[in-house]
Amino acid sequence: MSDLADNVIDEEGFIALVKMPEGLSLSEHNACLDQIVCMTAIEVKSRFMIMHKISQTYSQVSKEYIMPGFQIVDKMSTSEMFLSSSQVSARSRELSNYATHSTHSIRSVVLEVWFSSCRTAGSTG
């Protein structure tokens, strides 16, 4: 990468506005602009891909784990006044078991997405 391209990225990894060096020919100036545009496009695409993967993961976790948990809680609360104490205890255990299982499953999904993203980032860099 050229010195110009190295100076385009700021310390936080963002594309920074740069002043073109003086004395460049028109073709050198255009080549520098092309490089900056290309780098900016790659950065935008990368950020979009990250946000897309985050939203997919959230939707998956919500559908598979969060909403079913709400259904269990809702089932418990609406019928609790009609249940015996042993039935309430059984449903409480069901909810506790579900919470434990879901926590582990969600952690697995997040780790899978994280490691998948790391492998993808490593192979494209």
Image (cartoon, rainbow, N blue to C red):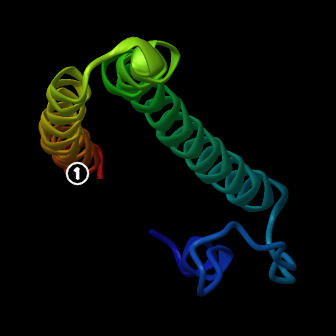
Give the camera-side residue of 81 and 74: 81
Relative to residue 86, is residue 31 depicted above or below? below
Give the camera-side residue of 35 and 56: 56
Residue located at (79% from left, 61% from top): 29
In the visual, does 67 lie left or right of 38?
left
Mark 1 belongs to which amino acid? Cys
Residue 74: % across, % down: 48, 19
Give the camera-side residue of 40 and 66: 66
Relative to residue 12, is residue 27 depicted above or below? above
Give the camera-side residue of 41 and 73: 73
In the visual, does 8 lie left or right of 24?
left
Q: Residue furthest bottom?
A: 11
- The quadrant of the picture occupied by the N terminus is bottom left
Residue 66 falls in image quadrant:
top left
**Residue beneath disc 1:** 118
Residue located at (70% from left, 60% from top): 32
Residue 91 falls in image quadrant:
top left
Total marks shown come to 1
Residue located at (22% from left, 51% from top): 118
- Pointer 1 local density, CA inside 10 Å: few below 14, some 14–19, many at least 20: few
Disc 1, SS = helix
Residue 94: % across, % down: 17, 27
Residue 20: % across, % down: 83, 75
Relative to residue 59, is residue 35 depicted above or below? below
Residue 83: % across, % down: 32, 16
